[in-house]
Amino acid sequence: MMPLRRLLLACALCAPMAQAAPPLPEALQSQLDRAVLDYESGRHAQARSAFEALARRHVPAAEFNLALMHFEGDAPRPDPELARRLLQRAAAGGFVTAQLMLGQQLENGAHGPRDLVAAQRWYEKAAAAGSVDAQVAAATAYYLGRGAPKDPVRAARWYREAAKGGDIGAMYLLASMYEQGDGVEQDLRLARYWYEAAARGGDEAAPGKVRELDGRL
């Protein structure tokens, strides 16, 4: 996982891409970008002040970044409870990375009780918005029946989306599902296609599966 400090920079500067909501007005986006640059330059007080001002205007990216400052201890008086509220507001506001992080926290019990069902709801929101990590998490929940009813068809759907997004593990798992006919109609050619894609991505077991299917085909 990306360290939180780098995650903060990436998410704020890429806010229009990371949000399901429409992009910010230019003036607000400029304020957000300056706040992130202040943070990266070590001007934490200025960054915090800007994030707080933007959070009062319900800018989800600012709520997310301010939450991270509290989680990271970069605020003068870190407040985990405030951070949780800010993260929830950012997620509810459509900020995809906040949705993914909230799902992870609910799954792991990082900042409160574990709730796998709620975690899956946030994973699916982020997955639908294009987060590859969330697509893998949502698929795994359906595959294992963890936080959602066991459903190989839905698992295959999200693994397929994550595989198309470049996730090597999802490529391998989707290939296995095509090989076995698990959640999808058995199709050895599609299985070989995804095993080969996983092999090109560096999966160590995939080349052997490609050779095995070549023999069967």
Image (cartoon, rainbow, N blue to C red):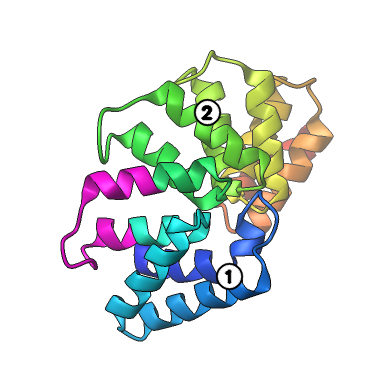
Could you say which disc has been placed on residue 116 in the image? Answer: none
Image coords of residue 160 (percent x, y): 71, 38
Residue 22, given in percent of the width and then of the height, sits at 70, 55
Q: Residues within 10 Å of mark 2 (few under 14, many from 20)?
A: some
Find residue 81 and report its horizontal and vertical position in percent.
24, 44
Q: Nearer the viewer, residue 58 or 112?
A: 58
For label 2, the residue is 121
Residue type (three-letter) at the residue carrying disc 1: Leu
Image quadrant of residue 177? top right
Asked if residue 36 is positioned above or below residue 53 in the image, the reply reads below
Q: Quadrant of residue 179?
A: top right
Q: Is residue 22 left or right of residue 95?
A: right
Amino acid type at mark 2: Arg
Q: Nearer the viewer, mark 2 or mark 1?
A: 1
Depth order, front residue of 61/137? 61
Residue 135 visible in the picture:
no
**Please, what secondary structure does the residue beneath circle 1 have?**
helix
Task: Identify the residue at horizontal 44%, vertical 37% (top origin).
Answer: 103
Residue located farthest toward the bottom when viewing the structure as drawn: 41
Disc 2 and disc 1: Cα gap in Å?
Answer: 29 Å
| Circles 2 and 1 in contact, beta carbons < 8 Å | no
Q: Give yes or no for residue 17 being in the magenta stretch.
A: no
Sequence-first disc among 2 and 1: 1
Location of mark 1 (residue): 28
Left or right relative to 189: residue 87: left
**Which residues are the magenta region?**
68-86
The stretch drawn in magenta includes residue 72: yes
Crowd class of label 1 (few under 14; some 14 to 19; many from 20; radius 10 Å)? some
Image position of 5 with respect to 155: above or below:
below
Q: Residue at x 67, y 58 (%)?
A: 200
